[in-house]
Amino acid sequence: MQRVGLLLRVKPDKIEEYKRLHQEVWPELLSELRAAGIRNYSLWLAPDGVEFGYLECDDWQAACDYLAKSEVHDRWQVFMQNYLDSPTDAAHGGQPVQPLEMSFLME
């Protein structure tokens, strides 16, 4: 299992709408994330718009490759570009993220 930490930045004037949209994530997107092997996915948003994402998967690169071919995921990423200051990372399935290096783990 791989643990993946991601850093995003939500535009300050879009934070409330961004939070609302994430309470109503498209069911077909959730299905695609699961089909990509992603599980235990959570997002943590600070008041200034800095957001930390955490997820688990068996193979992060394979998950990104799968999502890069997903029309549903692509539509969501295009939609989210209205809310994120982060650039899209084509190497990670079009994710507008900055992957983080794990510096500590206590199990």
Image (cartoon, rainbow, N blue to C red):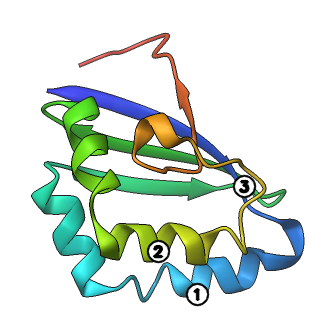
Camera-side mark, 3 or 2:
2
Sequence-wise first label, 3 or 2: 3
Q: Residue furthest top?
A: 103
State the residue in front, 92 or 69.
69
Residue 106 pos. (x, y %): 32, 16
Residue 19 pos. (x, y %): 61, 78
Real-space Cα distance between discs 2 and 1? 14 Å
Assign a secondary structure to mark 3.
Answer: loop
Assign a secondary structure to mark 1.
Answer: helix
Dot 3 and dot 2 residues touching (CB under 8 Å): no
Sequence-wise first label, 2 or 1: 1
Residue to which mark 1 is pinned: 20
State the residue in front, 40 or 30.
30
Residue to which mark 3 is pinned: 46
Measuring 29% from the left and 29% from the top, which residue is drawn there? Answer: 3
Residue 86 in the figure: left or right of residue 105: right
Residue to which mark 2 is pinned: 76
